[in-house]
């Protein structure tokens, strides 16, 4: 079977690493904001104290005039630090908090998905084990009925024993068909999980990581702009250029490709295991009685299939509409909230 636990654990680990990294950014900016605010308040208080003292002296020399200008400039500088800390809190740290919140919400959805995948996988394989046990039981019953018939010393009992033996043959054939079909269903599930399930989820996460990369770049640039606007820090321009060159595409693609390889090489399909005495080959028994049983079963399965197909088609149409909406919002962010659409996509 697919090593589902390892695949999903890799995704969870990658999400956890993203969350931890952005939390490190938040910790830095939180402490820096507090330092800037504290420095601004203290610088203002210190400047005001000396301004008051200088004004009380009443001296009006050139030196006194320049000294007051220096003090007032420092008082203004303290105000700029306070303004900076306030803007950075709202435009940088809160934005990083929102980014972490989105990733944590995504992680919870992924964990819910993991539980669902485990549950479905276990159901398929438990069913295979259950039907294999029934098949084994019917093999023993068939063998016992055959031996009773072949060893019967009473000719009068032989027709009855033959009918019982033939009934056991029918039960055995049905059990073998049920067991074989359960394996086919499990393998179909694994194939769907590999080609559409896990890789589809990986692709969605890949898109989410790329969006998070853009968001972090935008936040870093905002921090540089605040530095430049308030402190006129020329160094911000070179830092801003470095931010523009930030690209997590290589890392994202490495994760994506490693998961693809891991999925493709870690599949071991369940195999049909025959009873020793019978040496059965995998495949359906298609005599007249078995066909009747299979047709009746097919009718029931078709009803279930129709209901599930209808639900899948509805979900597919819903997703197509959501992806179109996401594309529209990506091209024109002012039209709507991209994150909200991504949340709905993950939910669907």
Image (spheres, rainbow, N blue to C red):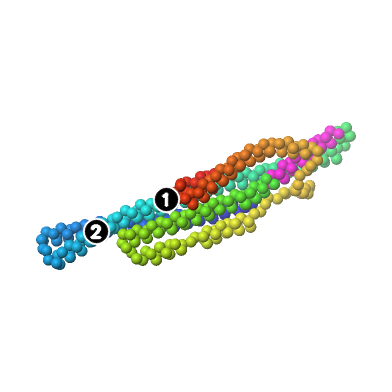
Task: State how many labels appear.
Answer: 2
SS at mark 2 in the image: helix
Classify residue 47 as left or right of residue 108: left
* x and y, in percent, of residue 67 in the image: 17, 64
Q: Earlier in the sequence, mark 2 or mark 1?
A: 2
Q: Quadrant location of the C terminus? A: top right
Identify the image quadrant of residue 29: bottom left
* x and y, in percent, of residue 287 in the image: 80, 40
The residue that mark 2 highlights is: 76
In this orientation, which residue lies closer to the viewer: 224 or 299? 224
In the picture shown, does residue 96 fall above or below 151? below
* x and y, in percent, of residue 283 in the image: 76, 47
Residue at position x 74%, y 39% in the image = 294
In the picture shown, does residue 195 fall above or below 312? below
The residue mark sitting in front, 2 or 1, is 2
Q: Residue furthest right?
A: 155
Magenta-span inclusion, residue 230: no
Identify the image quadrant of residue 167: top right
Classify residue 234 as left or right of residue 55: right
Residue 271 visible here: yes
Magenta-span inclusion, residue 163: yes
In the picture shown, does residue 117 fall above or below 50? above
Measure the alpha-carbon separation of dots 2 and 1. Answer: 32 Å
In this orientation, which residue lies closer to the viewer: 14 or 37? 37
* x and y, in percent, of residue 228 in the image: 34, 61
Q: Which residues are magenta?
A: 159-183
The residue that mark 1 highlights is: 98
Residue at position x 11%, y 63% in the image = 59
């Amino acid at each position: 079977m697919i090593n589902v636990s390892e695949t999903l654990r890799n995704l969870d680990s990658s999400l956890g690493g993203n969350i931890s990294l952005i939390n490190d950014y938040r910790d830095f900016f939180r402490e820096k904001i507090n330092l800037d605010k504290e420095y601004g308040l203290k610088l203002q208080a210190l400047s005001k104290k000396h301004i008051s003292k200088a004004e009380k002296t009443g001296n009006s020399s050139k030196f006194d005039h320049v000294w007051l200008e220096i003090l007032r400039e420092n008082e203004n500088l303290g105000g700029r630090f306070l303004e900076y800390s306030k803007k950075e809190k709202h435009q940088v740290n809160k934005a990083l908090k929102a980014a972490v919140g989105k990733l944590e919400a995504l992680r919870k959805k992924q964990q819910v998905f993991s539980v669902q995948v485990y549950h479905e996988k276990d159901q398929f394989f438990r069913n295979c084990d259950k039907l294999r046990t029934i098949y084994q039981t019917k093999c023993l019953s068939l063998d016992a009925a055959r031996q009773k018939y072949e060893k019967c010393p009473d000719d009068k009992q032989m027709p009855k024993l033959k009918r019982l033996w033939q009934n056991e043959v029918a039960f055995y054939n049905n059990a073998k068909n049920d067991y074989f079909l359960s394996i086919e269903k499990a393998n179909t599930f694994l194939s769907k999980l590999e080609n559409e399930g896990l890789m589809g989820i990986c692709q969605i996460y890949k898109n989410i990581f790329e969006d998070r990369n853009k968001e972090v770049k935008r936040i870093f640039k905002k921090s540089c702009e605040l530095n430049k606007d308030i402190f006129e820090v020329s160094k911000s321009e070179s830092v801003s250029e470095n931010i523009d060159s930030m690209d997590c595409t290589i890392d994202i693609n490495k994760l994506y490709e490693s998961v693809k390889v891991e999925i493709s090489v870690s599949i071991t399909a369940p195999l049909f295991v025959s009873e020793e005495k019978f040496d059965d080959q995998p495949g359906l028994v298609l005599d007249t009685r078995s066909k009747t049983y299979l047709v009746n079963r097919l009718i029931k399965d078709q009803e279930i299939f129709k209901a599930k197909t209808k639900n899948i088609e509805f979900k597919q149409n819903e997703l197509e509409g959501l992806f179109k909406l996401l594309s529209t919002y990506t091209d024109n962010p002012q039209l709507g909230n991209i994150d909200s659409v991504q949340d709905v996509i993950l939910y669907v």
